[in-house]
Image: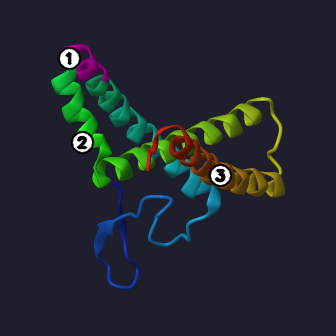
Amino acid sequence: MDIKTISPATKTVRPRPLSPNIQNYRPQLTSVLSIANRITGVVLSVGAVGLVIWLSAAAAGPKPYAAVQQAIGSWIGRFVLFGFTFAFFMHLCGGIRHLIWDTVHGFELRSIYISGWLVVAASVMLTAAACAAGLCVGGWL
């Protein structure tokens, strides 16, 4: 059912804007993190398919595994791997934030913004730490 409104000035019928109308509102940290959490969940689902492909190639033998490793080792593959790593940590930190909220703590406006920025900072730091660990272990980047 499409809700319509009549404009008093022009007496024309137009579709009523949906609320919240993203064109009228300035993005806030809470809304951006909520959207980012959903996007990272989808990205991680795609990454899980990539993980299955990698494991299947390893089970199929040295030639398929070498082909997948070559793709992962390219600069595009490393960029995608970096993105999956950031998505993992962003989703993880956002999930921890929601677990804290499930204990009915941190709902004051100041706490919400502090925990939001902590999610962003922790995601960046954990991604950097994972990249550094990868460099130390096997030259990930």
Report how far apart the C-alphas of labels 1 and 3 lie in the structure.
36 Å
Three-letter residue code for mark 2 = Ala
Q: Would residue 1 be visible to someone looking at this image?
A: no
Task: Report if the CB atoms under discs 2 and 3 are less than 8 Å apart.
Answer: no
Task: Report if the CB atoms under discs 2 and 1 are less than 8 Å apart.
Answer: no
The residue sitting at 55% across, 57% down in the picture is 32
How far from the left and from the top, in percent, is residue 27? Answer: 56, 66
Return the residue nearer the eye: 100 or 53.
Answer: 53
Instruction: From the image, tell me which residue sits under label 2.
Output: 71
Q: What residue span does the magenta drawing correspond to?
A: 55-61
Report how far apart the C-alphas of labels 2 and 3 lie in the structure.
26 Å
Near mark 1 (Cα within 10 A), the count class, few <14, some 14-19 or many ≥20, is few
Single out the mark in the foreground, 1 or 3: 1
The residue sitting at 39% across, 44% down in the picture is 81
Return the residue nearer the eye: 47 or 61.
Answer: 61
Return the residue nearer the eye: 134 or 39.
Answer: 134
User: Given the current orientation, which residue lies at the most extreme bottom position?
Assistant: 9
Say if the magenta span includes residue 60: yes
Instruction: From the image, tell me which residue sits under label 3.
Output: 125
